[in-house]
Image (cartoon, rainbow, N blue to C red):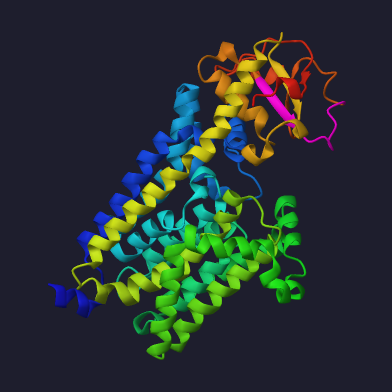
């Protein structure tokens, strides 16, 4: 059996599936245990608020693939679930989406190698981004692995699969501006396979991603958010000589050993073996895409960025090593007794690593809860705090505070609704403070009419927002 597997160049299907199951079972448990740490975060808190108040999806900047995860809390809203249940299910949604794709790949299309690659991508470089869950880039990359898994299931790609995958390619490309990079990488990697590069259907599949990329940039107006992101990478070529002086590079160097050690190890092994075997095409793909992508992200966030945010941009590096490893090295290595025990042990280590980070994010919630408790000493239920008076080193980002405190207060009862907005002193609250029948958020003031029929938030406080000073802040 072992020789048969080696000759076919494929992983042991049973063990590959078991490894994937362990990945997603572990992530499911962690998503339930740390659901508050994952959803009481600015972006997820804002998106869930939009879903609850509008009773619809909160799609932004044409990233309509996010409907796959937003459908979970939206269904809960339609069915009248409690606020706490919505927080739990939204946390699980970001595990359920890749899990669903894993199941389809493993049992539907029987491509267990790409199914495990999806599992590895979801776990192996995930650290702080486990607590910043809504990244459309990561969701797009999960779908990317799925569509390539369907395209490469079997030695021949049937034309019906091209018809199925063509619209999914659009979803991948629209998911995030950077998904086209791993798309090009996987196209180049699989076209190095003799059976696939002789098939017109597979060539057209690979080109479909570039076709949709052209449609996106030529026919679809670039959203303001994406336009702002593009500006961050302007002048990158001119900055490259200072690569090692960037704060982002110094930080990333440390992260390679503390968080991204799986990538570092596989990159070095793959590059060495490909060069030794004179497999120049694959050696070039892995080396140039990995190093080029690191330069792109470090140069875009040369000041360092917020750790959980920038980590989500580093995670596509996993695609550049996991897929080559599972296709070119693992089939031979699995004949050694240590291989599968090492894989299962590594999965457990990674799950423990994620759990060990949780106190950093639990402290944010504890601080917010102490702040809400202190507000009970004041009349009213609506408060504003100058950002200069809060521990930003702990909170990291505070623009979602009005939503985050809203959930923490109302999840016990809608009648206990309270809110605290932490505002940037450079954006004065003067224009909002005179309003007494409104909920303040970073993007404007929402009149109480929005909440009149809400089963989750009861606003009855018609007084003005109270500005709290440093003496009211918890230590």
Residue 156 visible in the current orientation: no
Q: Position of residue 43 (x, y in %)?
A: 61, 40
Q: Which residues are magenta?
A: 419-430
Residue 426 is inside the magenta segment = yes
Q: Residue at x 43, y 62 (%)?
A: 145
Foreground pick, 121 / 349: 349
Please, is residue 362 above or below residue 182 in the view?
above
Foreground pick, 319 / 364: 364
Residue 309 is inside the magenta segment = no
Q: Quadrant of residue 194?
A: bottom left
Q: Residue at x 59, y 65 (%)?
A: 212
Q: Residue at x 70, y 55 (%)?
A: 226
Q: Residue at x 44, y 31 (%)?
A: 88
Please, is residue 105 above or below residue 432 in the view?
below
Q: Residue furthest left?
A: 1
Screen quadrant of the C terminus: top right
Q: Residue furthest front?
A: 475
Q: Quadrant of residue 50?
A: top right
Q: Residue furthest bottom?
A: 278
Residue 310 visible in the current orientation: yes
């Amino acid at each position: 059996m072992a020789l048969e597997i080696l000759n076919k160049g494929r992983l042991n299907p049973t063990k590959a599936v078991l490894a994937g199951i362990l990945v997603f079972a572990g992530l499911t448990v962690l998503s339930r245990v740390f659901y508050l740490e994952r959803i009481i975060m600015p972006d997820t808190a804002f998106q869930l608020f939009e879903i609850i108040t509008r009773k619809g999806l909160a799609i932004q900047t044409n990233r309509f693939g996010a409907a796959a995860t937003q459908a979970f809390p939206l269904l809960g809203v339609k069915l009248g679930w409690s606020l706490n249940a919505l927080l739990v299910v939204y946390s699980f949604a970001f595990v359920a989406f890749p899990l669903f794709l894993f199941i389809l790949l493993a049992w539907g299309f029987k491509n267990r190698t790409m199914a495990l690659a999806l599992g590895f991508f979801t776990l192996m470089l995930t650290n702080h981004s486990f607590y910043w869950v809504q990244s459309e880039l990561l969701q797009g990359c999960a779908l990317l692995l799925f569509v390539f898994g369907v395209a490469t299931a079997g030695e021949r790609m049937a034309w019906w699969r091209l018809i199925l995958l063509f619209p999914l390619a659009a979803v991948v490309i629209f998911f995030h501006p950077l998904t086209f990079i791993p798309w090009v990488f996987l196209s180049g990697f699989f076209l190095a396979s003799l059976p696939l590069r002789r098939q017109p259907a597979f060539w057209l599949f690979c080109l479909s991603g570039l076709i949709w990329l052209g449609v996106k940039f030529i026919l679809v107006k670039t959203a303001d958010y994406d336009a702002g992101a593009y500006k961050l990478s302007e002048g990158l070529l001119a900055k490259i000589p200072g690569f090692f002086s960037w704060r982002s590079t110094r930080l990333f160097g440390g992260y390679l050993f503390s968080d991204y050690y799986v990538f570092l190890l596989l990159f070095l092994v793959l590059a060495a073996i490909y060069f030794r075997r004179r497999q120049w095409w694959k050696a070039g793909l892995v080396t140039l895409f990995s190093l080029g992508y690191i330069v792109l992200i470090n140069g875009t966030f040369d000041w360092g960025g917020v750790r959980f945010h920038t980590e989500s941009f580093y995670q596509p590096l996993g695609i550049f090593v996991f897929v080559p490893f599972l296709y070119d090295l693992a089939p031979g290595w699995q004949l050694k007794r240590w291989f599968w025990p090492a894989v299962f042990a590594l999965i457990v280590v990674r799950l423990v690593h994620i759990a060990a980070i949780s106190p950093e994010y639990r402290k944010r919630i504890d601080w917010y809860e102490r702040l809400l408790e202190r507000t009970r000493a004041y009349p009213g239920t609506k408060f504003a705090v100058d950002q200069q008076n809060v521990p930003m080193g702990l909170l990291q980002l505070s623009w979602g505070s009005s939503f985050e405190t809203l959930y923490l207060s109302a999840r016990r009862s809608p009648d206990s609704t309270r809110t605290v907005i932490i505002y940037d002193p450079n954006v004065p609250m003067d224009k909002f403070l005179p309003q007494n029948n409104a909920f303040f958020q970073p993007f404007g003031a929402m009149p109480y009419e929005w909440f009149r029929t809400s089963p989750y938030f009861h606003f009855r406080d018609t007084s003005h927002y109270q500005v709290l000073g440093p003496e009211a802040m918890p230590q």
